[in-house]
Image (cartoon, rainbow, N blue to C red):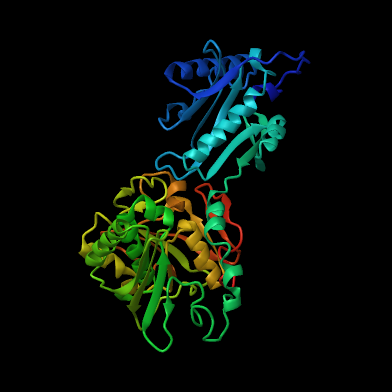
Amino acid sequence: MPLHDVAMLTGGFTPVQQPARPAVPWRIVPADAAQVAQYRRLRRDVFVAEQGLFDTDDADRIDEDPRTVVLVALVGDGTVVGGVRLAPATEGRDIGWWTGSRLVVDARARGRGGIGAELVRVACQQALSRGVLRFEATVQVQNETMFSRLGWTRFGVSEVNGVAHVRMRYPITRIADLVQSTKAELQALLDPYGAWGTSSEATLGGSGFVGDDGAPVPGTDVIAACDAILPALIEKDPEWAGWCAVLVNLNDLSAMGATPVGMLDALGARTLSAARRMMNGIRSASDAWEVPILGGHTQLGVAPSLSITALGRTSTPVRGGAARFGHTISITADLSGSWRRGFEGRQWDSSSSRSGAELRMLGAMIATAAPAAAKDVSMAGVVGTVGMLAEASGYGAVLDVDHIPSPAEPMGDWLTCFPGFAMVSTDTPGRSRMDSALTQTAECGEMTLERGVQLRWPDGEKTPAVSSTVTGLGRA
């Protein structure tokens, strides 16, 4: 539906030059029920009576959608002098595609401080805060300049009730920003060690294993994986940090189809008490997965730090860079659990409520399914991890957003969080699906010849998520 700034609509009438009006104080707030009623009356006054854009009423299904957010501009006495609404573009599951519509400004308030433009700005902020990944509006041609000034871009044309419109999109870079902040510097850091990959066994990761979750130990069937925990997480929740240190390393081994056999830890803490709390988390995870701590290093009186090296064994490691053009991308995730308290929107905790047997069953899924390629979803999120697998394989990828398994949470949060257990895998269509009572899995995309990762939406539109490579550690 169209998103109208009445101050800029020309409709079927000739605009009359009006003298500048003095600005009046106003503020923008989420509307309550009474304010929504005022906003609806204002829309009828403008779109029906004044502009003739609708015959009798401009109401539609979006007005009845309980997820719809209405923002209104109020003057000092509480009168609504403008408003806009935003809502999911699709019925059913919220997949992160929202539209803005019905932007209106009272005739008596037009030209008084840019109410229409500010309503659009606040609507964009609301969309971002709700995990939206695609935000669009259909606006009359005369309004394109205002939206362009606010950062929107044109991507199509349409006609609404006989009036020419343009389709505008607000650029959302949440996924690209995450990739940039977590992985983008690896190429520059590791290139001297052969990060681009050669036929030499001296290549970082071993020949054919550039950018994998673990590294084969030459001459053996041993896979080694090493991950560290962010100091901020250690400070905030030491036990959880200890648990996560085990979780992320064993997930890395799992992604390569390896069976874990032991771990080494390196721990730093300011006090003995803090060190004990970290070790409590490590021990609990060690017991749950039945993987022993073989030894390590501990230092007290220092800034908090924690890393674990995990060792596993497999004679047939699954590579992260073995995807091929035309392979189907599958995503398998444990959707049980909830956001970790204190880390809402960033860490999904499905593991702490699982039994040890269930955790070990999850860890064996890649080895059992034996897909052509696989990677554990890392700090770069689902889409960033797909990007890493794609670039290591020498290809790009497209993901169907509405097919991606996710909990009933904002899609933007889910695709950029660290999940408890989630794997990306590829193979020929229909093969190596990791069906399990503990997870949801779906084929949700394919490898392409274009660099980067694109998101494909139910209407067939594609939006860029990762424009090129993620780490630079690959042939893409």
For the N terminus, the image quarter is top right
The vertical placement of 404 against 199, above or below, is: above
Residue at the farthest bottom position:
219
**Up-down relation of residue 394 to residue 111 (above or below):** below
User: From this viewpoint, which residue is outermost toward the front?
Assistant: 301
Determine whether, in the image, residue 394 is placed left or right of residue 365: right
**149 lies above or below 460:** above
- Whether residue 305 is visible here, answered yes or no, is yes
Q: Position of residue 240 (x, y in %)?
A: 32, 55
Identify the residue at horizontal 78%, vertical 15% (top origin).
17
Say which quadrant the C terminus sits in: bottom right
Q: Quadrant of residue 165?
A: top right
Q: Residue at x 67, y 29 (%)?
A: 163
Residue extending furthest toward the top: 77
Q: Position of residue 472 (x, y in %)?
A: 59, 68
Give the number of callouts. Answer: 0
In the image, residue 356 lies at what x, y percent? 22, 63
Residue 373, quarter of the rendered image: bottom left
**In the displayed structure image, the side of residue 72 where residue 156 appears, left or right:** right
Above or below, comparing residue 44 to residue 85 in the picture: above
